[in-house]
Amino acid sequence: MSFSITEPSPRQKWIAGTLVIAYALLTLIPLLWIIATGFKTPSDAIAYPPKVIFSPSLEGYVNLFTSRSRVTPEDLAALGPPTTWYDAIVRQYDMVITGPSRYGERFLNSVIIGFGSTFLSVFLGTIAAYAFSRFKVPLKDDLLFFILSTRMMPPIAVAIPIFLMYRQLGLSDTHLGMIFLYTAVNLSLSVWLLKGFIDEIPIEYEEAALIDGYTRFQAFYKIVLPQAATGIASTAIFCLIFAWNEYAFAALLTSGTAQTAPPFIPTIIGTGGKDWPAVAAGATLFLVPIMVFTILLRKHLLRGITFGAVRK
Amino acid sequence: MSEPMARRIASATPSGLAHRIRGLSDRTIAWLFVAPTIFLLLAVNIFPLIWTIRLSLTDFRTNRPNNPVKFVGIENYKKILTDVDTWTSLQSTAHFLIWTIVLQVLIGFTLAYLINKKFRGNDLWTTLIVLPMMLSPAVVGNFWTFLYQPQIGLFNYFIEFFSGTDPASFSMIGEVNLAPWAIVIVDTWMWTPFVMLICLAGLRSIPSSIYEAAECDRASKWRQFWTITIPMVLPFLMLAVLFRGIENFKMFDLVVQLTGGGPGSTTQLVSIDLKREAFEKWRTGYASAYAVILFVTVFGLASIYVKALNKVKDR
């Protein structure tokens, strides 16, 4: 290893490391607190001083997935002993489970809309990006800027006519309507990111393929697509994360059938005050997949968040 | 390289023949590939925008679709620009925008600077720091109201722990003078990693040979910082500010879940105000005019800013 005068000294590294780790731990507290609260009993959750050490309970998760109603102690006694562990938890509070809650449906909606719109926006984005990258498209720069500028509109501003338009077309509160909407919102990201990735693939491979008698289409899916695979995958994850997290459109345009989890989770309430363990349990299940994706994506994170403007 | 090989071959072939030999021509493929994207964006962005502009000149109300719609010209625009509420919202937005950007730039740059010292494990910690930014603002914002609870909230506990203030004596989201800071704190917590990542890219783009040369010229570390590090990171930093600026001007989800615009209208940012006009008071025409004004403002400010950014880059 060659000696460098610009290499930080061990002491500098130690100080820098300590400060960064301190910040990271501080910034992770709210997230760890969400996960911890999900495993607390309601009384532990609102204890003061806040309980760091507690005996874990699945009450939050049970409350998240069920709807319950209160019964008199006599009725409860008449029911006989609880048959399942979750029955047992609920009965401590003189309640019985009356059915599943809406959380499962809402979560499923998030999955359907998230994956549906991701697939569409990555598919459309890939072919558009390929065209922008390889062909002379008239007004190319203007079109690319137009695509980017659609991201500047405040969602609420576009929501008014979309709300009216969807009502006319019968698309309000439908999965299809939300998939189209999120696809359109994500297209700017996917076109810009993918154009960057495809620009990086040397054009010579395709030229060689064309000379060997491949058609453009063949060259596209046999040569370009495999080489752009990593780029396509990371673009897909970014689109998915956006659709997964989106709140404004979901809150304004969906209320029942197609409502996703973000507008639903804050509305979870318990009997007598907000059921924070259930909210935290819902949030945990919703957030943890994204945390995993973020860790998988770390190499492309910067590129994704800047629309490909910074590539490292 | 002037004209790529393939294109020369393709253009040398007559188009009708090329169609038979190679399938579709490049031009057709280009249009075929770009058209769906452009079409969808026109349908979901431009068409609504034109509709918004049209609505903004009327007194249409969505909740009374059978009322006759009257053309009112620029009346809505006049009303909005002279309404005190609009200016209060703009002020709240400005407060939010300025403080989040100042704090995020300071903390984000410092973190990037420290991470760039390449201590062991810096990659792992960087990834962990980034986590809050990737999560759903609405879900996380909602949970922050729990952390901000007086008496039981973790945030209030921390304040008590470090300053001895009674945790039941203040409510971050319930008090007029604290709520604007409550939203600044959460946004800073969430989005500082964004600025940090971009600054880090900037710092890593500086070739170490520049520092080596400065070292040979006996420039002090302080001087190196101000004459090399800062100017070289500046374009990156400005890009980060542009992104955060646009995002926070549009801010809706995080703040609506945290405070809902309250108490009173102290944290009623423009997007929240607009949502109330459009979807609670159902003054569709008025809200449309409001939306147009906001869009023009973002677009205008962003264009001016991008010009400045390009100047810095070219220097």
Image: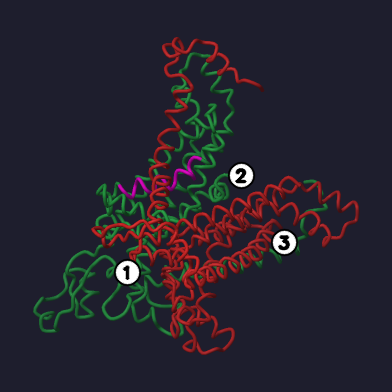
Chain colours: A green, B red
Amino acid type, mark 1: Thr
Circles 1 and 2 in contact, beta carbons < 8 Å = no
Q: Is residue A97 left or right of residue A114?
A: left
Amino acid type, mark 2: Arg
Q: Find residue A244 and report its horizontal and vertical position in percent.
A: 40, 54
Secondary element under disc 2, as helix, strand or loop, is loop
Tell me where the magenta segment starts and ends, as one range: A177-191
What crowding class fits label 1: few (fewer than 14 Cα within 10 Å), some (14-19), or many (20 or more)? few
Circle on res. A311: 2
**For the point 49% across and 58% down, which residue is it?**
B293
| Relative to A77, residue A67 above or below | above
Q: Is residue B146 left or right of residue A208?
A: left
| Relative to B201, residue A126 above or below | above
Between A217 and A49, the one nearer to me in the picture:
A217
Q: Which badge, 1 or 2, comes first in the chain's sequence?
A: 1
Between A126 and B273, the one nearer to me in the picture:
B273
In reply to whether residue A178 is colored magenta, the answer given is: yes
Circle on res. B249: none
Q: Find residue B142 and report its horizontal and vertical position in percent.
A: 41, 69
Secondary element under disc 3, as helix, strand or loop, is helix
Q: Which badge, 3 or 2, comes first in the chain's sequence?
A: 3
